[in-house]
Image (cartoon, helix red, strand yellow):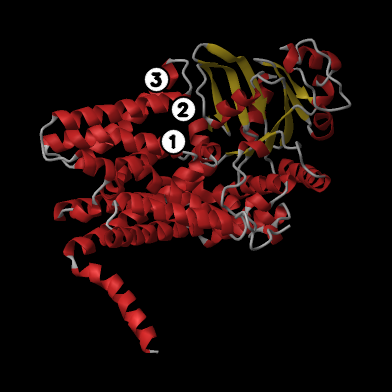
Amino acid sequence: MMIDVCIFSTSLNFLLDPLSHEFMRRALMVSALVGGVCGLLSCYLTLKGWALMGDAVSHAVMPGVVVAYALGLPFSIGAFVFGVGSVALIGFVKQKSRIKEDTVIGLVFTGFFALGIVLVSKIKSNIDLMHILFGSPLGISVSDVRHTLAISAIVVSLLFIFRRDLMLYCFDPTHAQSIGINTIFLHYLLLSVLSLSAVVGLQTVGIILVVAMLITPGATAYLLTDRFDRMTFLAILSSSLSSVIGVYISFWFDIETGGSIVLVQTFLFLIAFLFAPRYGIFKVRKSPS
Amino acid sequence: MINSARFANQNDPLRIEAKEICVDYNGTVALYDASLNLGSGCICGLVGMNGAGKSTLFKALMGFVRPSRGTICINGVSVRRAQKDQAVAYVPQNEGVDCSFPVSVWDVVMMGRYGSMNLLRMPRESDRQAVFHALERVELVELQERPISALSGGQRKRAFLARAIAQRASVLLLDEPFAGVDVRTEKLMSDLFLQFKNEGRTILISTHDLSHVRDFCDLVVLINKTVLAYGETSKVFTQENIINTFGGMPPNLLSGPTTTEGYR
């Protein structure tokens, strides 16, 4: 009995101790929020088959972030310009040459990414390359928090207002267009939201791993349900949970936060992959008919 | 003659009116001088080889491609306006949609109502009734909660037909509706098409399956980069016209689908 209580209070301390640090409270809050936002978006990206596009845009925002920093503008503006710009460029090169789309995507985003790295090394400032590449939720500043909150609010409200249209656009763009829904607008809306999410994701897991935040939760949720609304809920839940657990693990074992968050996400995916009721390898329930 | 035609127009506006339309994709001509008038309440087969311009004509009617020349009117208004009026519904081929998408039959049919809803697409009671009524007509009420991934090919086809019904479209464009459906669905669909016709809807069926054209379509359009001929099936659907349509290859009229790709 005593031992039980002891273990309970030790584990409680284990959870509560980190919260006595201001930076940990901030990191947990921001990571959970960013996780939720990226988790919501990940549903659309995985269903639309835009994983590669997510990877491309999240890398292509890098020079935008650096330029914005150098000019003293908000990160999001630079990211937005370069994110959408990279996709426009991908479309242009694809249309004007005989090169296949996936090659063009790879080509453009690595080019942008390289430009970003060169710019960071050239522009003498206190931007830390490692922070952009790998994220640093434990060192996030108050202004960054405010910034993240603002972008998250924009992203979530856009995704909420257009959630049905975007779902229809992912499912059956032909029908969407034939009933007078502007699919070009939806296409660019999704891209803009993707660029903005890449900026907030960058704060917690860094540019290299942000694509994981943008696809893994959606993939996990997709294995667990056949209903779209439930899928978004599960994606947000698993993503936020991964962020919180990841930050704790990073604190306890003193490891890179971005890596630990993404590893938790991957672990959750693996569980769904193996044990999902209907679509897991070891089906727990038989599918109907 | 001209007067009587105009009179007929006023009483009975043409569902589809295409005047000498040309469509090209970056210089490659897909359709030229294609003209087509279809009144209300008819079932019309659209017959041609792969690449003959069937899907281009569909795209032009739905407003996805703008003809470089010629005009298209649906119910007497522009295609753009017809989109807003929810006038045209496209029923895709089964391969044309992602069947593992996490939506239920009910959700799919509700998508037919989106164009009539507000920005947030919140269904009203009338939308729910329209969906339920559409499900009744295709006999899918019991399966309304099923994810579309758990449906058979025929059931899926019926779900998309129900979407067009819920949309209250007056022009239905169907892509290979009889491909891969069970006998029950085929019977149900042919009954539905007759009902649609009596309700004044116009159905355009794109198909390779010539036997179905004989059985279901009162009109037929033969197409090969342009409209070669169209009119009553009994008059237009002649061996000679069909051979012309298929580029000199006489297709087997009894065994339905023809493969002419190798001879293009």
- In this orientation, which residue lies closer to the viewer: B40 or B165? B165
Quarter occupied by residue A279:
bottom right
Residue B31 visible, this orientation: yes
Label of residue B211 in the image: none
Mark toward the start of the polypeptide (2 vs 3)? 3
Residue that appears at 38% across and 53% down: A160
Lateral position of residue B95 relative to residue B219, left or right:
left
Pinpoint residue A149: horizontal percent, then vertical percent.
Answer: 24, 55
Question: Decide: marks 2, 1 in contact (CB < 8 A)?
Answer: yes
In the rendered image, which residue does mark 1 sit on? A52
Q: Are marks 2 and 1 on the same chain?
A: yes
SS for callout 1? helix
- For the residues labelled 3 and 1, the Cα–Cα distance comes to 17 Å
In the rendered image, which residue does mark 3 sit on? A93
- In this orientation, which residue lies closer to the viewer: B1 or A245? A245
Residue A227 visible, this orientation: no
Residue type at mark 2 is Asp
- Identify the residue at the far bottom of this view: A1
